[in-house]
Image (spheres, rainbow, N blue to C red):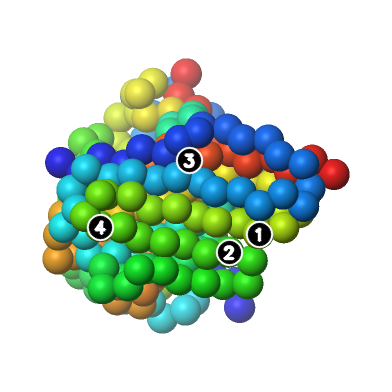
Amino acid sequence: NAGVTQTPKFRILKIGQSMTLQCTQDMNHNYMYWYRQDPGMGLKLIYYSVGAGITDKGEVPNGYNVSRSTTEDFPLRLELAAPSQTSVYFCASSYLDQPQHFGDGTRLSIL
Amino acid sequence: KQEVTQIPAALSVPEGENLVLNCSFTDSAIYNLQWFRQDPGKGLTSLLLIQSSQREQTSGRLNASLDKSSGRSTLYIAASQPGDSATYLCAVPLSSGSARQLTFGSGTQLTVLP
């Protein structure tokens, strides 16, 4: 049972480039989440989804987009990368409001 | 807006010591409170979830308490071990009535010395 899988693990982008962070879960969880964690800080919610076809903004959604076409996948897209988006990105999933299961993160640097 | 504070930011203790980690939050109308563990380079692992109607939860050597009226929670670790070394974060919902949007404290980095 793989749980929550995030790819890639590391990535360096140039300012203005775009990329998609992938997240997939095999636990049939209906809820999925994207967070970012800046050094020495807690996590901040970017977007979340309560089921396929349904997404909603979290605390810090600007500069990001998401889609949820299947229960398993919840990709996060950066359209125009900016230095302020340098961070560690975590994807998580849960069954309803039960404890969230986290992936190991994607470490993204934008130069 | 819900804000979560964790003090201290870092803590170093000798093996075998009992210790308490603190978490405070500004809006007491919370649905629940969770404690997570984060190992270096890894994601978060849920340790304990306390519902708003509960006062405490226990799992092995861990005991978490919740005092909604004072906006505080504590995580008690008994007989600490080097394997307990990690960052511990607490999280509460951003708004009352929904556990989907969590706001996190910045964590306490715990080092247990052998």
From this viewpoint, is residue A34 visible? no
Residue kind at label 2, given as amino acid type: Leu
Q: Chain of mark 4?
A: B
Q: Residues within 10 Å of mark 3 (few under 14, many from 20)?
A: many
Residue at image mark 2: B62
Query: Which of these two is toward me, A60 or A53?
Result: A60
Give me the residue at 33% from left, 50% from top. B72
Is label 4 on the same chain as label 1? yes
Residue kind at label 1, given as amino acid type: Ala
Is label 2 on the same chain as label 3? yes
Mark 2 vs 4, N-terminal side: 2
User: What is the CA distance from the residue labelled 2 to the residue labelled 1?
Assistant: 7 Å
- Which of label 3 and label 1 is nearer to you? 1
Q: Chain of mark 2?
A: B
Residue at image mark 1: B78
Residue at image mark 3: B107
Query: Which of these two is toward me, B104 or A62?
Result: B104
Answer whether labels 2 and 1 touch (C-beta < 8 Å).
yes
Answer whether labels 4 and 3 touch (C-beta < 8 Å).
no
Answer whether labels 2 and 3 touch (C-beta < 8 Å).
no
Query: Which of these two is toward me, A10 or B20?
Result: B20
Query: Which of these two is toward me, B73 or B1?
Result: B73
Residue at image mark 4: B68
Residue kind at label 3, given as amino acid type: Gly
Answer whether labels 4 and 1 touch (C-beta < 8 Å).
no
